[in-house]
Amino acid sequence: MKKGTLSIISTVLGAAVGAGAAGRTIGQTVRKAQNMSDKHLALFLMMNQWVKVKQEGKNLADYFEKNHFKTIAIYGMSYAGERLCEELKGSSIAIKYAIDKNASSLYSDVEILSPEDVLEAVDAVIVTPIFFMDEIEEMLSGKMDCPIVSLEDILYEI
């Protein structure tokens, strides 16, 4: 009788622990997927705004000139960072360098530095991974004495 009761209790307890562990794993997976979804939605909305700006005949170089940003650094050299470099080619705005945590594995016509490197003075840093703007701004504000501006903010202000 004791063996049977102990066996049932062990089975129920094992199932409960297993269900709890599975629920925790599923919860983490769902949170991670939701974060990725939110990140990509924010990027899509920003890129959509960029298209609207272009369709209105506006360009980012005018914004930088108006704000006296003659030399800039671009934080983030994924899709938006690459497009920003292309848009500013041939303009009066000098991209001194880019900053990316994956600097060693990226290629660009612009020098790409790691956030840990010594970062030369510029008039502004333009942040393209807008979903992480707060963390990036906090990290860079201690290293740089210039405005750190989200590309998203620029696109909605222009």
Image (cartoon, grey):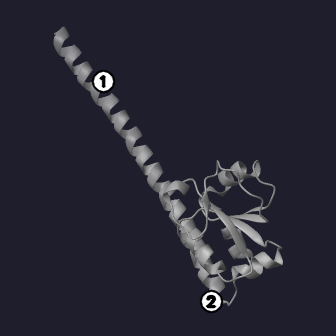
Q: Quadrant of residue 8?
A: top left
Nearer the observer, 25 or 76: 76
Q: Which residue is mark 2?
A: 55
User: Residue 62 location in percent, x, y?
Assistant: 76, 82
User: Residue 17 location in percent, x, y?
Assistant: 34, 28
Q: Is residue 13 left or right of residue 117?
A: left
Residue 13 to residue 156: above or below:
above
Q: Amino acid at mark 1?
A: Leu
User: Residue 96 location in percent, x, y?
Assistant: 70, 66
Name which residue lies at 64% across and 51% down: 115
Name which residue lies at 78% across and 73% down: 70
Residue 102 to residue 51: above or below:
above
Q: Quadrant of residue 44?
A: bottom right
Q: Which residue is mark 1?
A: 13
Nearer the observer, 6 or 90: 90
Sequence order check, earlier mark of 1 and 2: 1
Nearer the observer, 111 or 85: 111
Residue 121 to residue 85: above or below:
above
Secondary structure under tag 1 reads helix
User: Residue 12 location in percent, x, y?
Assistant: 27, 25
